[in-house]
Image (spheres, helix red, strand yellow):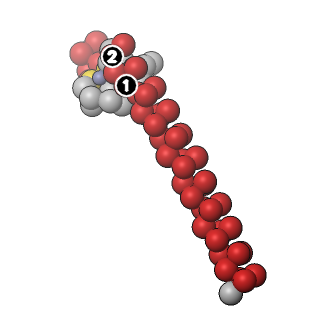
């Protein structure tokens, strides 16, 4: 029943969506690197969003004070 097990217990690569082992998130080292890069990029956008929010709130506060 090894075949059935391999069909049931499988995962898809987080990067290229190919089938990969359950204990891993990616199918290859290349995809692992891609995933790490993607996480870094996402973090960057997350901080950028917060920075923009802070600027927006500052502008609002200034316009309330002086408007
Ligand atoms: Zn992959």
Assess whether mark 1 and mark 2 are in contact (beta carbons under 8 angstroms): yes
Q: Quadrant of ligand 1?
A: top left
In the rendered image, residue 22, in percent from the top left (x then y), is placed at: 40, 21
Q: Residue furthest bottom?
A: 67
The C terminus sits in image quarter? bottom right
Callout 1: CB less than 8 Å from ligand 1: yes
Q: Is residue 17 left or right of residue 44?
A: left
In the rendered image, residue 31, in percent from the top left (x then y), is placed at: 34, 21
Residue under numbered circle 2 = 30
Q: Residues within 10 Å of mark 1 (few under 14, many from 20)?
A: some
The N terminus sits in image quarter? top left
Residue under numbered circle 1 = 34
Location of residue 23 (image quadrant)? top left
Camera-side residue of 15 and 59: 59
In the rendered image, residue 9, in percent from the top left (x then y), is placed at: 35, 24
Camera-side residue of 58 and 53: 58
Callout 2: CB less than 8 Å from ligand 1: yes
Q: Residue at x 37, y 25 (%)?
A: 34
Secondary structure beneath dot 1 equals helix
Q: Residue at x 65, y 60 (%)?
A: 54
In the rendered image, residue 27, in percent from the top left (x then y), is placed at: 32, 18
Q: Residue at x 57, y 58 (%)?
A: 52
């Amino acid at each position: 029943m090894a075949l059935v097990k391999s069909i049931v217990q499988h995962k898809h690569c987080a990067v290229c969506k190919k089938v990969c082992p359950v204990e891993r998130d990616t199918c290859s080292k290349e995809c692992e690197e891609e995933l790490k890069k993607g996480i870094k990029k996402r973090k960057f956008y997350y901080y950028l969003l917060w920075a923009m929010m802070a600027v927006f709130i500052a502008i609002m506060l200034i316009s309330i004070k002086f408007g």
